[in-house]
Amino acid sequence: YVEDNATLSHICYMKVKLYVVSDVHGYYYELIAALTKQGWFDDPGPKKLVVCGDLMDRGGNALKMQEFMMELLAKDQLIFIRGNHEDLMLLMLDDILDDLEPFADYRSYHIRNRTLDTAAQLTMFSFPEFIARSRDFVFKTRQTDFVKTLIPASVNYFETKNHIFVHGWIPCNRERIYGMNQYYYRPDWRQADEEAWNEARWINGMEAGYLYNVIEDGKTIVCGHWHTSYGHSHLHKQCSEFGPDAIFEPFSDKGILAIDACTAHTGKINCVVIEDELLEADNV
């Protein structure tokens, strides 16, 4: 609210508790377990679930995940950051209409990424039905709550007083030198176009932030997309990346908090709880 008197005008923004997850990939029961452990269902206060992208693909509970997210959206308790797998779903639907031939090969990009499987779960089409009725399949998939409502409701980033929530990382300038990516901070990243955000969703944020200092002064960037064992192994040198000693707990360093637990591999989802102030009253 805004309070005015003869000498002072100021704005007070509501503090909110943010339950933050990423790359849940259709693992509904693992998500519920993580939220239960952190107290989501017993928390009566103002709260939001922040999903840092990749809501579907991999797990087998797309319908339950869709239903749960729609319930949260209706209660204004969901902040959905767009991930690269949201982009892949829309790309797949266009690709099916352009050329069905590649989908007859199990090595198809959309089959390997399990995007086709997600659409099949949501529409209850079998693979033979998909091949025989591909246009109906596309139409029905586009009418699902995931494609029709949740993806359009997603945002490139969400910012609070002390945090920025993204999928891969914030848009930055990139060069390929001797076959390696090098990243540089881009001051106007908030005004980046969709092409830049599409690229940013594929960035390993731990690499960009830790190795190239692409961070935002005074803020912590919270990201997913890349398994946290990368940071614990390659950056902090604490463990192997996928061996028996691998660490998939959240990775934190200056200006960085990465939370992707590689759920398909570990069977768990990291959920971090953050109390912060919203920047705009209409974000509440």
Image (cartoon, rainbow, N blue to C red):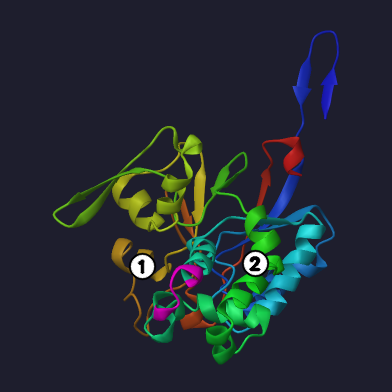
Looking at the image, is 107 positioned above or below residue 88?
below
Q: Give the mark nearest the N terminus, 1 or 2.
A: 2
Q: Which residues are magenta?
A: 96-101
Q: Is residue 106 magenta?
A: no
Disc 2 marks a residue whose amino acid type is Arg
How packed is label 1: few (under 14 Cα within 10 Å), some, or many (20 or more)? many
Question: Which label belongs to residue 142?
Answer: 2
How packed is label 2: few (under 14 Cα within 10 Å), some, or many (20 or more)? some
Quadrant of res 55: bottom right
> In the rendered view of the protein, which quadrant contains the C terminus?
top right
Instruction: Identify which residue, 230 or 110, lies in the foreground.
Output: 110
Left or right of 111 on screen, residue 63: right
Looking at the image, is 123 positioned above or below residue 219?
below
Instruction: Identify which residue, 133 or 177, lies in the foreground.
Output: 133
Instruction: Identify which residue, 60 or 135, lies in the foreground.
Output: 135
SS at badge 1: helix
Q: Inspect this view and state whether residue 32 appears.
A: no
- Residue depicted at x 82% and y 55%: 45
Quadrant of res 142: bottom right
Residue 86, image x, y percentages? 54, 63
Question: Which label belongs to residue 230?
Answer: 1
Quadrant of res 102: bottom left
- Residue depicted at x 44% and y 33%: 188
Q: Nearer the viewer, mark 1 or mark 2?
A: 2
SS at badge 2: helix
Residue 40, image x, y percentages? 75, 66
Disc 1 marks a residue whose amino acid type is Tyr
Residue 35, image x, y percentages? 69, 70
